[in-house]
Image: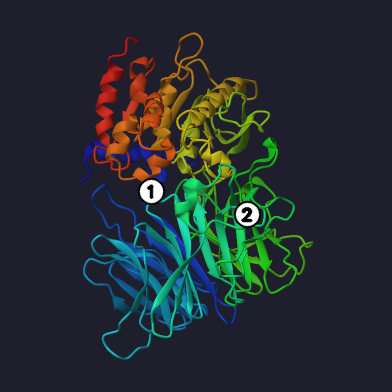
Amino acid sequence: GIPEKTHQNHFQRTTMPEEQLTAAEVRQHAKACYFSAAFCDDQEVHLSWVQTRGKVEKGGGDSGKDLVVMKRSGFPRIVRRGEDLVGGVVFSPSGRLFCFQKKDSLVWGCTTDGDLSTTCWFTLGAGEGFTGSPVWVGEDVVLFGVSSGEPKRDRLFFSPPLRDSQPPPTRTGPIFTAERGGTLMGWDAHERSVVVVHRLANAMLAEIVMVTSSAQGSFAPTVLAVHDKVEYCKPMAAFLASGALLLRLNALLLDNDNNHLRDASRLEILPPETQTIHGLWILDDLSPEGRLEPVHVMPAHDHGTYDVCSGSYGCLGTTEGFRLDSRRTRVVVTARKHTADSGSISYTDELFCLDFANEELCPRKIVTTTCDAEKGCKIPVAVSESELVYHFRSPTENGDLYLASLSASSSSEKPTTINTRLTETMPLSLKDKLIIPKEEIINNDNAPFRGKDSSGPLAIHSLLFTPRDGEDGNRPLQPILWLHGGPMCQYSFDFNPLLSWLASCGYLVLAPNFSGSTGNGLDFMSRVLGEGCGLADLSDCLACAKWLRNYKEKEPRLDLSRGIAVAGHSWGGYLAFMCMLESDTNGESVFSCGVAAAGITDWFVQQRHTEVRYYDYALMGGWVYEKEVQARARAVSPISKATNLRAPLLVLHGDKDQDVPFEQIPPFVQAAKSSPHP
C-alpha cells in the first residue's frame, strides 16, 4: 500500500490547477537528446535521437537510454533499448548506414533494412574508452577516438573496413596521439589527409593539426593554426570538396595580412595588441605559408562582430557546429550579432547558407524570426541540395527537429518563415505552462576595466521572467537576481524551465549575462580573466540590483518591501557569496537574502584542490602562490569578508564536489556565523 503521507501529497498534486508548473516537471529526468539526421538519395530523411529514461527515485529505477530512429514519413522505432550509449547516431554520407558508440563497442546498422537491425562492428580493449564522436570516411570506414594508456592519452584510429571478412577485424593507427595531454575535440578526413582539433593541456588553447599519411603507412602531423579561448566557442575544422579547410576559429592574427599564430608556445611573447578574431575562415593553402581568409556570414557586419556558434547554459540536444552537405560544397551555419549598439544585443540565433560551388559567395538567411515564439537556439543538423534539418530550442521548447527549404536562388529572396516540425518529444502539457521571457538591456554606468577607447555604459543582456498574464494578476512579485554558472557560458533565449517555475511561484526573475559570459564577443568574456575576476562581474550584478529597484515604475506588482534576493550555482554561487557581502552607502546589505550553491569561497583552497586547475588559472590570471596574484586572490575570496555578512544566506554544497572542493566551505560558514550583524 501507499503510505498515508505519500497518498495525501499525491492527492494534493493531482488537484493543482493545470496551468501551474510543478517542481517535478522542472526536474524530470526523462528527456530527448543527441538528435541527428541524414538525407538519402531519394530525399527521404532519416532522423534519430536518444531518449533518456527517467529515474523512479534517486539511486534507483531504470536510467538506461533508448536509441530511436525514424523516417520523415514514418513512426519512431526503438532500435536499442536500455543501452549504455556514448552519444547518438552518426549517419554515413549517403544516409544508408549509421553507427553509434556504446561504452565498449562500436555498433552499425542500415537504414534500408526494414528491421533496422544492428551489429557490433568492433570492441574496445581493456582500459579503453571512446572519446568524441565517430566520423565516416566514405561508406565503410570511420575515424574514431579512444582514450587509453598510462598516462591516459587520446588517440585517433581508422576503423577496420565494415565488410572485412578476415577475423578478427583490426584498426589502423593511432593516426594521431595527444602526446602533450589534453583532448581530441573533433576530426575530419579527405583523401590521404586527416585534420584534428586538439585541445591542449591548459585547455584554453587548441591546435588545428593536419595529419598526412605516407605510402609507407606513417603519419606526419603539422600544426596549421592555434585557437584561443576555447571556452568561448569550440573550434571546428572540415574539408571542402576543393581540399581547402573550412575553420571555425578564434584566430590569433599577427598582422593585417591575416598571418596567424601556428605555434602555441609563442603565445606568451606575442605583443599586447595581437588580436583574437572569432569567425569562420578558409585555409586554401595548407602549407606553412598559408593564410586565413575570412568567410563573411553576415556581410552587413564586420568579421568578428558576430558569433558563428550557438550557446546555452545546459544541454544543447545535438552536436553544435556548422554542417556540410554530402558533396561538401554547401554549408549551413548558425550566426548571431553581438557587438551592435547597446539596445540591439540579442541572444537568439539565425541560420545562414553558403554555397562554395559558386565563385561569388553570397550568404543567405534560411530561417528568419518573426515573433518571440520563433526566437531561440537553432543548430543545423543535416543539409541537402534543397532542404535543411535543424534543431530548435526556446524557452517553451526543450528541443526538436524541424525541416526548412533551401530553394531560394538568391540572397535577396526572403528566408523561410513556415517550417515543418519533424519530431515532438516534449509533453504539450509542459509547453503550455512555460513562460517566454523578455530580453532586457541593463546599462552598467560604473563598469570597471573598460579601456581608453570605451565610452558610455556597458550593456548587459538579461532575461526577465514574470508570471504569465492571468496568473494571480494582483499578487506581489518578489525580485530575484539569478546568476548562471561558468562564468564562460550564457543564458540564451533557451529552454530553462527552472526560471519559468520560479516566476510561476510569484517571483520576478532577472537572469543577466554578466561580464565573463559568452555570446557577446571575446572581449566581453575576457573581462573576468585576470584582474577583472570577481570584480567586473560583481559590478554588473550590482547594476542589475539597481535596475530592479527602478523597475517598480514599469511593473507595479514588484514588491521591494523585503528587498532583493540573489541566487546562483557554481560561478553563480560564487557571485552570490560576493553579492551578499556588499553593503550600500548606509551600511546595509545590498541584497536582503541569498542562496549560494557550489560556490568558491577561498581561491587559495580552490586552486590547490580543484580538478579544473586550467580554468581557475585563466580566471585568476595566474597561480595564487605567485606574488602578483596573491593580493588579488585574497581580495576576491568571499572568506576574506565573511564577517561582513548582514543578511540571511543559505549555503548549499556537495561534500564530494571535485570542481569546487568542499574543504573551503566549513571555514566560510564558521566565519559568517561569527558576524556581529544579526
Local secondary structure at mark 2: strand
Count residues near mark 2 (Cα–Cα under 10 Å), then give few for <14, some for 14-19, many for 20+.
many
Residue 147 in percent (x, y) is at: 31, 64
Residue 544: quadrant of the picture: top right
Residue 448: quadrant of the picture: top right
Say which amino acid is labelled 2.
Ala
Residue under the image location 27 percent in, 72 percent down: 124
Residue placed under numbered mark 1 in the picture: 28
Label whose residue precedes the other's in the sequence (2 or 1): 1
Q: Nearer the viewer, residue 226 or 363?
A: 226
For the residues marked 2 and 1, what is the alpha-carbon distance in whole angstroms?
Answer: 31 Å
Residue under the image location 36 percent in, 30 percent down: 627
Residue 92 in percent (x, y) is at: 48, 77
Left-right relation of 614 to 455: left
Q: Nearer the viewer, residue 38 or 599?
A: 599
Determine whether 157 is above or below 317 in the image. below
Q: Is residue 508 visible?
A: no
Left-right relation of 210 to 181: right
Residue 110 in percent (x, y) is at: 43, 81
Residue under the image location 21 percent in, 69 percent down: 126
Question: Can you say which quadrant of the picture contains the C terminus?
Answer: top left
Residue 363 in percent (x, y) is at: 71, 62
Local secondary structure at mark 1: loop
Q: Nearer the viewer, residue 173 or 658?
A: 173
Q: Is residue 168 visible?
A: yes
Report the residue that reaches farthest toward the bottom. Answer: 165
Residue placed under numbered mark 2 in the picture: 335
Q: Which mark is residue 174?
A: none
Determine whether 62 is above or below 479 in the image. below
